[in-house]
Image (cartoon, helix red, strand yellow):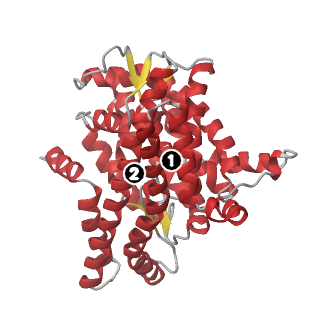
Amino acid sequence: MFMQVINFIMDAGSSVFMPVIIFALGLVFGLKPSKSFGAGITVGIGFIGINLVIELLANNLMVVIDQLVELYHFKLTAIDVGWPIAASIAWSGKAVVPAILVAVFVMNIILVVTGFTKTLDIDIWNYWQPLFIGGALYLLSGNFIFSVIAACLSMAIIFKVADFSQPYIEEFFGIPGISIPHIESTGWALLCIPVNKLIDRIPVIGKIDLTPEKIQKRLGILGEPYILGLFIGAILALIAQVDAATIMNTAIVTAAAMFILPKMIGILMEGLMPVTSAASEFMQKKFHGREVYIGLDAAVVVGHPSIIATALLLIPTTLILAVILPGNVTLPLAELSGLTFFTVWAVVPSKGNVFRGWLIGTFIMTVVLLISSDYAPVMTSLGNNVGYQFPEGASMVTCLSIGSQWISWIIYKIFSLFI
């Protein structure tokens, strides 16, 4: 029965159940029912808009990416099948899924109440990330307790990282009261902030500052973010040597994403602001001024023009890295169209510097490819256990999303030593 309810929620998706969660939170924090209802519906509309644009961009980029892989004969043994496959595999681990879900949810409430974290995570769809490490350890050892502890430890750490990174999110994106407890995205804040400071000290390179705003100031209309997206999309398609119609289509879709996504995020924030304000007032009254952040998916921030531009530049970079990187067996494929989720913290520390975002993003993708390669055998085994049908010719499967979860990977490797 428990798993049936969870599957129903997962199948309905964030655009359906997020309004319900926001409505309930609004009532808990003292908003009037009418205002809570309006906030929830507005958030649902925002999520639908964001998801539509991201899906449109991903579908069009995959045509170019497939052509790049075929044209340049990338031959690697572990195929990147994308986060939806990894998530479905993680959610299929019936032995540990109910325990991890309940444990993480209850732990989050306790940690907020006790003041360990300010982040109240309502992004239950991304619980698949701790579920994956729990499932991997359970497959390896059969140790139920270790698996649940490892999953909870991953999330406890990411809640603290979300707290730490929240001021950066608020300053750069202008979204107060929101944090991003997203292991594959926010974990990189711990590494990329110091890397950005290191680049500051490098002569010449440290002085290059190419933000969309500065490009626009210098180039006028040619520097508008959507024009930048138009050119980057067209160049990427030209490198793939696709036909003229595909080049034009890729260019205009990329431009559209650069233009529309920030507006969709604005709609989402319009719905969230009453709830975050009410949450702040509630905590002031009940917990003597303690703050609480609403924890959301990184989707609420990936529409920034500098993030999209950086992710597009990293597509060919990642393919080149895959070929030349010693120890890599991952063929990046399905998730190349979603690199925005991995590159948030390539851009945020430098305040939107696309050039520096590309440098830091190259470092991120190097680590992602190596961890994805290390995870390939266990993801393949987990897939076999739940009856996943591998792509034709694939000896192993993996995905860049699990490669991006470096904090969970370290926990996984440490626990593996004991079991």
The residue indicated by pointer 1 is 340
- Seen as rendered, the residue at the extreme front is 244
- Rounded to the nearest angstrom, the CA distance separating label 1 from label 2 is 10 Å
Residue at coordinates 27% horizontally, 38% vertically from top-left? 91
Q: Which amino acid does label 2 sit on?
A: Ile
Residue at coordinates 59% horizontally, 58% vertically from top-left? 165
Task: Say which quarter of the image contains residue 396.
Answer: top left
Compared to residue 80, the image places residue 23 above or below, namely below
Compared to residue 330, the image places residue 199 above or below, namely below
Q: Residue 190 in the image: x percent, y percent?
A: 63, 48
> Crowding near pointer 2: few (<14 within 10 Å), some, many (20+)?
some
Residue at coordinates 30% horizontally, 47% vertically from top-left? 101
Quick one: 125 or 330, which is closer to the camera? 330
Task: Say which quarter of the image contains residue 149.
Answer: top left
Helix, strand or loop status at disc 2: helix
Q: In screen coordinates, is 351 left or right of 343? A: right
Q: Can residue 171 be seen in this view?
A: yes
Residue at coordinates 32% horizontally, 34% vertically from top-left? 85
Marks 2 and 1: in contact by CB < 8 Å?
yes
Q: Which of marks 1 and 2 is nearer the N terminus?
A: 2
Q: Residue 118 in the image: x percent, y percent?
A: 49, 65
Q: Residue 76 in the image: x percent, y percent?
A: 48, 16
Q: Is residue 113 visible?
A: no
> Crowding near pointer 1: few (<14 within 10 Å), some, many (20+)?
many
Q: Which amino acid does label 1 sit on?
A: Thr
Quick one: 255 or 361, which is closer to the camera? 255
The residue indicated by pointer 2 is 54
Label of residue 59 in the image:
none
Helix, strand or loop status at disc 1: helix
| Image quadrant where one finds the C terminus | top left
Q: Residue 99 in the image: x percent, y percent?
A: 28, 43
Q: In screen coordinates, is 121 left or right of 225? A: left
